[in-house]
Amino acid sequence: MAANVSQSEEACTCPVCCDIFQDPVVLLCGHSFCEPCLQEWWRQSVVQRCPVCMEILTMARPTRNLALRDLSDIVRQEASQRATSGAPDLCELHNEKLKLFCRDDQQLICLVCRDAQKHEKHNFAPINEAAEEHRINIRTQLMHLNSKLGSLKAHQFNCNKMASHIKLQARQTETTIKEEFQKLYEFLRTKEAARIDALRKEAALKSDTLNNRIVNVNEEIALLTDRIETINQELTAEDLAFMLNVKSTLERSQCNVQEPETPPGGLIDEVQHVRNLLFNVWDQMKKIIKYTPVTLDPNTSGTQLILSENLTHSSESKTTQQLPDNPERKGPCIVLGFEGFSGGRQCWNVEMYYPKISKCS
């Protein structure tokens, strides 16, 4: 029986951390590891290799090994039962009941241990008081974890919103490019294809970048949610069982999740594809085309503004538009332009609308 237990524990041991598997994943080479251990190994490596056979892997996300996870949970429970059956409430040195907690050594002791030279002048507390102190500390850490989880979910929502807006931008910009090129379509067929190809490549690149960010955020949310559920379960345990695992609980409650940030430049650079499109073509075909010195940047446009298809003028929107909260936007009624001149005198025609005032007799 002991041999079978030893073989089961050996089969469920991670080669990296040498402990029973936590959230095991399997690689294409067939080796399994704890997902946190594998991710940490890959972060410290130049390329993604298997820690055992060192085979180079190209998989973006390892496959979860559900069967091995279930077997590891069973082995962990059996190990816990064996430890519990061995009278954990008795001191291993003096075979006396554990009644105190040594704050200096962070361990449970009996009354004989308290009088021993090893614990001389140490600070002690009853087990129930020590358990309550640690529970308060862990609950505080749990509040920080929940706060981080809320930030991650808010960031996830904004990323999904930006992903939808990128697709909308790609469609709108492609339509604008096609309409502009229709005016000189016979000559512009090759150039139109080149412009659309550049737009689609940028849309695909930025969509892929954002999708990778969304996948990473989803993984961090899943890991953080599992950690929070595990901590909540451990907090409901009896004082003795809780204190036996308090070190691992404290380590698990430490928050090492970085605050998510939305990097600038995540949206499609519509100015690059649309700015002075007809003027550049006019320069090649030697025909008169209206030149626009300033192009408005839709990534900076506020929610109360509507930009024209050629990005040359804006108008007030009757309804608030649902736009992503990207760093380039400065205000609901503000839009920035891309500078198209560096000197000389410029003239602007501004249309002003004044409300009619009725006179009261």
Image (cartoon, rainbow, N blue to C red):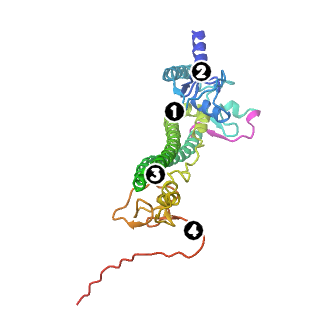
Question: Do the residues under discs 3 and 1 have CB atoms within 8 angstroms?
Answer: no
The location of residue 204, given as percent across then percent down, is 49, 43
Mark closer to the chain start, 1 or 2: 2
The answer to whether residue 205 is left or right of residue 113 is left
Up the image or down, 195 lies above or below 215; here it is below
Q: Which residues are magenta?
A: 117-128
Farthest-out residue, left:
361
Q: Nearer the viewer, mark 1 or mark 2?
A: 2
Disc 1 marks which residue?
238
Disc 4 marks which residue?
341
- In the rendering, which numbered label is found on residue 31? 2
- In the rendering, which numbered label is found on residue 269? none
Q: Nearer the viewer, mark 2 or mark 3?
A: 3
Distance of label 1 from label 4 (alpha carbons): 73 Å
Question: Do the residues under discs 2 and 3 have CB atoms within 8 angstroms?
Answer: no
The location of residue 290, given as percent across then percent down, is 46, 65
At label 4, counting other C-alpha atoms closer than 10 Å, the crowd grade (few under 14, some 14-19, many 20 or more) is: few
Element class at badge 3: helix
Disc 3 marks which residue?
187
